[in-house]
Amino acid sequence: MWWLEKRSVRIAALAALVAALAACGFRPLYKDDGDREASAELASVHISTIPDRSGQMLHNLLLDRVNPQGRPGDPRYVLDVKVSDTKASLGIIKDSSSTLAQIAIVANYTLLDLKTKSPLQSGRSRSVVSYNIVQSDFATLASEKDARERGLREIAEDIATKIAIFLSSRKDGKS
């Protein structure tokens, strides 16, 4: 009956984990508490146009995360984002050619209240991604494009999460 003992230990551990989470004040970010939920707050954020190709890609990724139902008709907030990236060659071999490159992408963002035009939150999100440089120029370009998209996806997730947490805590009267 050793398997019954393991099962009861697992159940006890699960119950302890649930109790610990309840005691620490944990609550889901997207939980509907009868009032406006975090996704409704996010839906009232207008994302300003971001220049350059990386900016366009980040803008679209943010729209997917912040406004999945479409742009807000009556936005309460505006999100301004500035993106910059740098590319560095790594993995230099004897003939001075590189076999590995790295793209560092930095996005500075500010969430503004539309009524007061005052900044509510600002921050920075950063992602560093690598890609291989191979003999085929097409393969290298495709690899670089994929790396850039991965980095921008990480940044979009990070910004959307930070803003959702901020708006949720603001709604609860914590900020």
Image: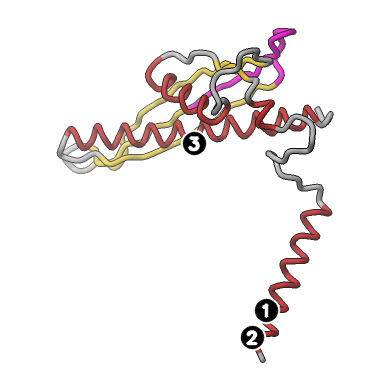
Mark 3 secondary-structure assignment: helix
Which disc is residue 154 wearing?
A: 3
Based on the picture, tell me whether residue 116 belongs to the magenta stretch: yes
Q: Which residue is mark 1?
A: 7
Marks 2 and 3 sit apart, C-alpha to C-alpha, by 42 Å
In which quadrant is the N terminus drawn? bottom right
94 horizontally vs 169: left or right: left
Label 2 close to label 3 by CB (< 8 Å): no
96 horizontally vs 91: left or right: left
In which quadrant is the C terminus drawn? top right
Q: Earlier in the sequence, mark 1 or mark 3?
A: 1
- Residues 115 and 130: in front is 115
Q: Position of residue 113 (x, y in %)?
A: 70, 14
Q: Position of residue 4 (x, y in %)?
A: 68, 85
Query: Pointer 2: residues within 10 angstroms few (<14), some, or many (20+)?
Result: few
Which kind of residue does numbered mark 1 sit on?
Answer: Arg
Q: Residue furthest top?
A: 116
Dominant secondary structure, magenta: strand
Q: Residue at x 65, y 89 (%)?
A: 2
Q: Position of residue 22 (x, y in %)?
A: 81, 54
Q: Which residue is mark 2?
A: 3
Which kind of residue does numbered mark 2 sit on?
Answer: Trp
